[in-house]
Amino acid sequence: MPKINDYVERLYREAVKAMKNAIVPYSGFRVGAALLTTEHKVYTGCNIENPSLMLSECAERVAILKAVSDGVKDVRAIMIVSGMEGYCHPCGSCRQIIYEFARDAEIFIAGKKGIRKYSIEELLPHAFKA
Ligand code: THU
């Protein structure tokens, strides 16, 4: 388990706050995400579902795309929190998004038993690259 330091704690708090905005009429499953840029700016996201289910967005993807669209080039860390008992590991599509836009980021996932830390190489070995 990683040592909880200031920025991890800050990201956890921001992700929990963002999770409250989740729009989940179909799954009822809330997810929140917060990322920290190397310039100490935080971007948050929540999952946003759509009646056309394929158009639903994951929390971490929302946070990353908000940052990218704001011109962010370097993401230092990402935190994912959810309403589940265990750990909400990112889906395959989000792993590819992280690989593309936050390759060097520390990836933290919070569960009831604490916070786990991963790299994208661990979560997405042999990633697709163009
Ligand atoms: N979801 C996320 O937001 N992030 C993940 O890492 C996995 C899944 C969302 C998508 C959908 O709104 C709900 O969780 C159930 O799959």
Image (cartoon, rainbow, N blue to C red):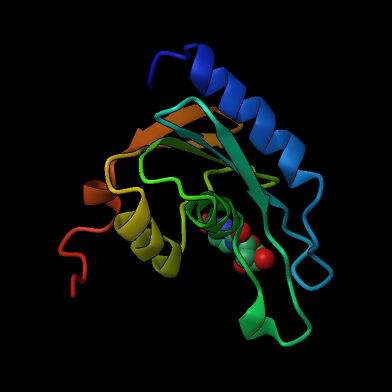
Can residue 28 be seen at all in this image of the molecule? Answer: yes
Q: Quadrant of the C terminus?
A: bottom left
- Left or right: residue 25 versus residue 108 is right
Q: Identify the residue at horizontal 46%, vertical 52% (top origin).
A: 89
Report x, y in % for residue 81.
Answer: 61, 41
The single residue placed furthest to the right in the displayed view is 25
Q: Nearer the viewer, residue 79 or 27?
A: 79
Report x, y in % for residue 124.
Answer: 26, 58
Can residue 32 be seen at all in this image of the molecule? Answer: no
Find ligand 1 in the image and state its quadrant. Answer: bottom right
Q: Quadrant of the N terminus?
A: top left
Q: Identify the residue at horizontal 37%, vertical 60% (top origin).
A: 95
Q: Is residue 52 shown above or below 85?
A: below
Report x, y in % for residue 120.
Answer: 28, 49
- Left or right: residue 69 versus residue 84 is left
When asked about the image quadrant of residue 12, the answer is: top right
The single residue placed furthest to the bottom in the displayed view is 52
Q: Identify the residue at horizontal 21%, vertical 49% (top origin).
A: 121
The single residue placed furthest to the left in the displayed view is 126
Q: Identify the residue at horizontal 44%, vertical 27% (top origin).
A: 39
